[in-house]
Amino acid sequence: MDVNEFVNAFAAEFEETDPSEFTAGTSFKDLGEWSSLTSLSVISMIKLKYGVIVSGLDVNKCTTVADVFALVKKSNG
Amino acid sequence: MDKNPFSLTGRHVLVTGASSGIGRAIAVESSRAGARVTVLGRDQNRLAQTLSALEGDGHEMNALDLNHADALERMVLGLDGVDGVVHAAGITRTAPAKFISQDDFQEIMSVNVQAPMELTRQLLQHKKINKAASLVFISSVVGGIMPYKGQGVYAASKGALSAYAKVLALELSARKIRANSISPAMVRTRLLDSVNIDAATLDADEQRYPLGYGTPEDVAWAAVYLLSDASRWMTGSNLVIDGGVTLT
């Protein structure tokens, strides 16, 4: 699992925010486009691409994209 | 002699999805109102717990998958005539529209729509629905009244179910058989586990409800009303019970 690939997949769930704004260190909840729907999309993307089920609460506890990646890696064992 | 119009004494009621949540509460409250209840569900152990929670005698259980055609037909053929049927089996998964898979679609639709339609077809074909019986479909406000994000298939399935109940109401009225749906808003049941929402988000959502979230019994008492003679002039309706949330 590659963090850059994850950042790209994470960025792809946003419709308005430019992908170039995303790095592993991006505080995604500060983005104007972050909402309950983008959260659902990220959760669905993680389930589909990584076969891991994370909760909205798990994602909300994260600050950066890298934090979410760590969550996925941990759950993926 | 006057009889309490809300009583289900002498009625045989079939309840699907009776192993937990709203279905279990409907089975229990129907038995408390005097009905003889046959409970259906997939989980044998939890269904047995429902059976043991019923008041009175003569109740039965049958653990089966309603989407298994042979098992369904065997169950229907072995059934005494019914005076009431409550379709409470239902599932959901959360996915925004761009992530709804064919698997999600087929699984949710087969449990929430196909199974109740097929059960109804078989009950009618085998003449198991008594005259003046009441058919109750547990729908949801999500099915066309109050959407929730991520519930596209669930919403489509519940909208389909409420629409189907209206057609049945029209087709079966000659035999005084009634069909209605109930559309509850959020009720805390096991179904919520599959929605994958955390407790804090649910608590915040509940704040929007003037009367808070509902309990399975709140829905069950409406079902008992629809099963009873008290609602004998009511057919083709969709009874919204929502703690006032759609007022806001």
Image (spheres, coloured by chain):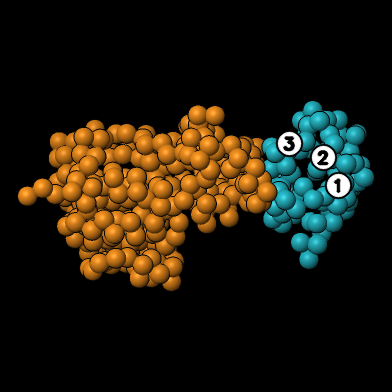
Chain colours: A cyan, B orange
Identity, as a three-letter code, of the amino acid under mark 2: Lys
Residue A76: image location, x then y, percent: 77, 62
Same chain check for tags 1 and 3: yes
Question: Which dot marks residue A29?
Answer: 2
Crowd band around label 1 with a 10 angstrom C-alpha radius: few (<14), some (14–19), many (20+): some
Compared with B180, A32 (above or below) is above
Drawn side of residue B23 relative to residue A26, left or right? left
Task: Point out residue A70 in the picture as x, y percentages from the top left corner.
Answer: 85, 56
Residue appearing at x 29%, y 45% in the figure:
B225
Disc 1: which chain?
Answer: A
Label 2 SS: helix
Residue that numbered label 3 is attached to = A35
Residue A38: x and y in percent read 73, 38
Task: Identify the element where label 3 is drawn.
Answer: loop
**Earlier sequence position, callout 1 versus callout 3:** 3
Query: Tag 3: residue type?
Result: Ser
Q: Earlier in the sequence, mark 2 or mark 1?
A: 2
Q: Quadrant of residue B174?
A: top left
Between the residue at mark 3 and the residue at mark 2, the CA separation in whole angstroms equals 8 Å
Q: Inspect the image, locate mark 1, and give the three-letter code of the amino acid beneath it.
A: Thr
